[in-house]
Amino acid sequence: MEGGDDGGGNGDGGRRRTKKTIRRHQAGEGPSGAAYEDPPVVLMEEDTAEAVPGEDEPVGPKKSELRSRLGWAVVREIYRGLPNFQRAQLKKMGFGPFLRLDELTLDVALIQALKERWDPECHAFLLSWGHMIPTLEDVARITGLRVDGQAVTGVTYTSYQELAERLLELDVTRERSSLILRTRLQASLGVVSARHQTGESQADYTTRMTEDSRAALAEEEGVAADRELRRFLILVIGKLILGTRGDPVSCTCLPLLEDLSSVGSYAWGVALLAHLFDSLGTSSRETGVAGFFPLLQVWTYHHLPSLGRGEPRLVGAVPLLQHWRFRRNEQSLRRQVSSIHDALDTVPFGHWTPYVGEDDATQPWVERGRPYFGRDIWLHSFNTVVPLHHRLVARTLGLH
């Protein structure tokens, strides 16, 4: 179903792009701070590895801060609270591997440094030796989401009020909007408060959310169970896969969830990558971070291990996001960003290698997506359509 926009859709295809250029270091030059003039500091609100202030990084909020509200822990605990038949349905839809993933601490400095290397004209990272991008194979192997199937596209509306009331029994934030308050959505799934209570341990915190969700959800199949499943899918898709920059959750995908039997036929992994590419193309002064940036982290940890940003935790685990964790760094955020830029300038040509030694037999989502690997393709996420220039990357790396 090809999507049309009635003029009030939530796409941002008309947003102006600014070209980023990378100046190469010359002999005798200082650190990358000379080439990158005062990169804006990024702080992500749910990052548990807090940046340590230094001389070059004053304490306190800045206008250029980027914020991310993934809400991963809440999604995971609600999933654990779902009845067995709901979890079986989500697995059949292809979300099983993704929903089993453990939370990954956001690598704030790495995301900022990579964002500054993004070339919006060719939708790829510009490094000293050429271009490099995450591909559909990376999406499948890292997240476990489907990259084959129907494009995530369709008609977008000026207002989703009628759909939200009919399918979710929830209200959008205002009459002409596609956003639902996150707190209202979580409360409808049993999690009234996602905040730590005084003296509450992490284990007690997660157990409380799971039990609250389990107590509130329907125990048998029916209209109520279908409504709750749509609410949960809106939270997963609108907060993680196609995450917005603010706290409210987008319900743009709601028309695709009306028929629950067809939800699993869509290539949600492709939509994730399209949304991420589109977010990377925004100004570095943007005050929010959209998209599923853990994909970008693990992709870098796996393909550019010389940066030393991640370390293995579960050897052999799939999807690959289970395999890595963020390596804590006590340097100030600004110094980390500068250090990453220096390291990116010295990554040797041809360092990027394809996946070897992976047990594809345990990853059916990879086998299904294989016909789409290694080719140029258009990535769809409703009103966002961006190219994946695999040929450009392959030519750069000599992988003809």
Image: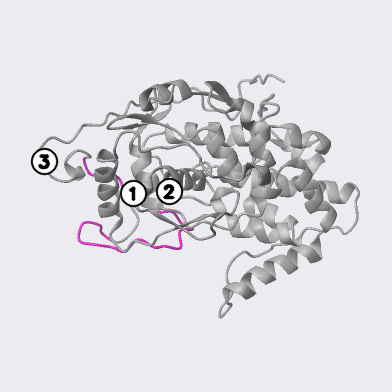
| 276 sits to left or right of 61 | right
Q: Of helix, strand and loop, which one carries label 2?
A: helix
Mark 1, other Cα within 10 Å: few <14 / some 14–19 / many ≥20: some
Disc 2 marks which residue?
A: 301
Mark 2, other Cα within 10 Å: few <14 / some 14–19 / many ≥20: many
Residue 178: percent from left, percent from top: 64, 37
Does the residue at mark 2 contact the one at mark 1 (Cβ under 8 Å)? yes
Residue 184: percent from left, percent from top: 68, 54
- Type of secondary structure dominating the magenta stretch: loop
Residue 389: percent from left, percent from top: 47, 23
Disc 3 marks which residue?
A: 29
Q: For the magenta stretch, what is the residue range?
A: 37-58
- Quadrant (top left/top right/bottom left/bottom right) for the N terminus: top right
Give the residue type at disc 2: Tyr
- Which comes before the other along the chain, label 3 or label 2? 3
Q: Which mark is residue 307?
A: 1
- Quadrant (top left/top right/bottom left/bottom right) for the C terminus: top left
Q: Which mark is residue 213?
A: none
Mark 3, other Cα within 10 Å: few <14 / some 14–19 / many ≥20: few
Front one among 36 and 144: 144
| 12 sits to left or right of 381 | left
Q: Any magenta on residue 188?
A: no
